[in-house]
């Protein structure tokens, strides 16, 4: 696969705004480890290899275990995630796939058991942000870093 275009170079002004929102999300006060998990899960759902690679790498850098990273895709069946993380991952799936079923009142209520209303807004903006990145990287074929020896 070959990258189609460099979106930062083609639309620098709007990409500055996207980057500013991304910085705000990263500094919003939610746990960095939680942000890594939701970014990874949304990127898995969307099939964004660039973001899956980046968020897996960044999570490892920040102390996340390989085992938990492998199990993000199967978080429902793993006891390795806290109740707060599980609530965030369930919210991630619903918001990322919002066109399928929306977000139910039951899920909203369950999520509020683990997040304040302010945190839930921040979580939702973080999900909007990663979904924006996925929607830039996938159609323009952003290529994740890879060792030259492993390239196909």
Image (spheres, grey):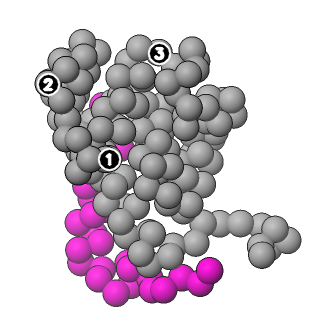
Q: What stretch is highlighted in magenta?
A: 1-29
Residue 28 visible somewhere in the drawing: no
- Which residue, given by chain and number where applicable, does mark 2 sit on? 105
Residue 114 visible somewhere in the drawing: yes
Q: In which quarter of the image is residue 7?
A: bottom left
Tell which tag, 3 or 1, sits nearer the viewer. Answer: 1
Tell which tag, 3 or 2, sits nearer the viewer. Answer: 2
The picture places residue 49, in percent across and down from the top left corner, at 56, 60
Q: Count how many numbered circles sit on residues in the image.
A: 3
* Callout 3 touching callout 2 (CB < 8 Å): no
Q: In which quarter of the image is residue 29?
A: top left
User: What secondary structure do most residues of the magenta stretch adopt?
Assistant: helix
Circle 2 — which element? Answer: helix
The numbered dot on residue 96 is 1
Say above or below: 118 vs 37: above
Depth order, front residue of 133/92: 92
Residue at 50 percent of width and 76 percent of height:
141
- Which residue, given by chain and number where applicable, does mark 3 sit on? 82
* Callout 3 touching callout 1 (CB < 8 Å): no
Depth order, front residue of 126/46: 46
Kindly report the distance in space between the C-alpha atoms of the residues bearing marks 3 and 1: 21 Å
The picture places residue 129, in percent across and down from the top left corner, at 30, 53
Q: Is residue 63 left or right of residue 82?
A: right
Q: In which quarter of the image is residue 118?
A: top left
Circle 3 — which element? Answer: loop
Q: Is residue 23 highlighted in magenta?
A: yes
Q: Earlier in the sequence, mark 3 or mark 2?
A: 3
Image quarter in which the N terminus is found: bottom right
Q: Residues within 10 Å of mark 3 (few under 14, many from 20)?
A: few
Kindly report the distance in space between the C-alpha atoms of the residues bearing marks 2 and 1: 17 Å
């Amino acid at each position: 696969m070959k990258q189609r275009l460099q979106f930062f170079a083609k639309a620098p002004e709007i990409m500055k705004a996207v980057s500013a929102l991304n910085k705000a999300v990263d500094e919003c006060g939610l746990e960095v480890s939680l942000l890594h998990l939701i970014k990874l899960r949304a990127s898995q759902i969307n099939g964004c290899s660039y973001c899956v690679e980046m968020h897996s790498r960044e999570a490892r850098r920040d102390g996340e275990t390989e085992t938990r990273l492998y199990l993000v895709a199967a978080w429902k069946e793993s006891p390795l995630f806290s109740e707060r993380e599980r609530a965030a991952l369930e919210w991630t799936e619903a918001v990322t796939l919002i066109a399928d079923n929306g977000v139910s009142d039951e899920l909203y209520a369950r999520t509020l058991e683990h997040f304040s209303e302010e945190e839930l807004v921040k979580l939702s903006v973080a999900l909007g942000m990663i979904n924006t990145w996925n929607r830039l990287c996938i159609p323009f074929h952003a290529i994740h870093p890879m060792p030259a020896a492993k390239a196909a």
